[in-house]
Image (spheres, grey):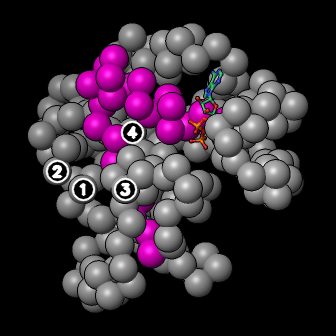
Amino acid sequence: MRSEGNPPILLVLSAPSGAGKTTIARELVRKYGFVHVVTATTRPPRPGERDGVDYLFVDENTFRNWIEEGQLFEWVEIYGYLYGIPKKHLLKPLTEGKDVVLTVDVRGKRSIEKVFRNDPRVRFLTVFLLPPSLDVLKERLLKRGDPPEKIRERLEKARDELSYAKEYDYVITNDDLTQTVRRIAQIAGRG
Ligand code: ADP
């Protein structure tokens, strides 16, 4: 990683499911040259999820090997599935001086924060996206084609997740997509 002058941004983006993290990460890649680093998981993909875009889907053997070899930042087990970020996937672009966006939940944010918050070689920044309202969130989940039982579950979970917003550097309401992306780029000093 470059140590002088203008370190790369490490942007951690969290939001309740459906609030727009993946969409915004994609825009930061397209318009501002960020690299989107995704979490590896042993959970099977949900319909519509794409390998390498939403998550890196790996089998349990591969994941366990990575653990043994110390290749992951702190990993977690949730409902029997393993989640973690491979060190090299994150360190490579940062070493090359590229800005990185990570889309993770609050647990992922906490574990990455432990590693990078005080590392002078990156500019560590955390952003929590809010949906304009729970009604709008519901509309977006519907539009995305999530099944009704998942929508109910995600809305319930969203209420919990919103309480984590206060531990992020910035909280932004993702109302208009273009404006949200511009605002994040400005915060990152890339706008
Ligand atoms: P997440 O990754 O947080 O689960 P997505 O990025 O998949 O959320 O976004 C959920 C849905 O909402 C998608 O269909 C996406 O196109 C749409 N969406 C995202 N941001 C906005 C926005 N600002 N305005 C309208 N629709 C949006």
- The image position of residue 142, as x and y in percent, is 75, 38
Decide which of 17, 104 is in the foreground and name it. 17
Decide which of 186, 54 is in the foreground and name it. 54
What residue is rendered at 70% in x and 47% in y? 146
Does the segment drawn in magenta span residue 38? yes
Name above or below for residue 14 compared with residue 26: below
Q: Which amino acid type is shown beneath numbered disc 2?
A: Lys
Q: Secondary structure at mark 4?
A: strand
Neighbor class of circle 4 (other Cα within 10 Å; few <14, some 14-19, many 20+) is many
Whole-angstrom CA distance, mark 4 to mark 2, is 13 Å
Mark 3 or mark 2, earlier in chain: 3
Q: Secondary structure at mark 3?
A: loop
Q: Which amino acid type is shown beneath numbered disc 4?
A: Val
Left or right, residue 152 beside residue 57: right
As drawn, the label of residue 89 is 1
The answer, for residue 165, to whether it is visible in the render is no
Mark 4 or mark 2, earlier in chain: 2
Whole-angstrom CA distance, mark 4 to mark 1, is 12 Å
Decide which of 116, 88 is in the foreground and name it. 88
- Of the residues tagged 4 and 3, which is closer to the observer? 3
Instruction: Check mark 3 vs ligand 1: CB closer than 8 Å? yes or no.
Output: no
As drawn, the label of residue 101 is 4
Which quarter of the figure has residue 78? bottom right
Left or right, residue 28 beside residue 62: right
Which residue is identified by label 3? 51
Q: Where, quadrant-wise, is the C terminus in this rendering?
A: top left
Would you say the residues marked 1 and 2 are in contact, meaning their CB atoms lie under 8 Å apart?
Answer: yes
Q: Which amino acid type is shown beneath numbered disc 1?
A: His
Magenta residues (range): 18-42
- Of the residues tagged 3 and 1, which is closer to the observer? 3
- The image position of residue 149, as x and y in percent, is 82, 58
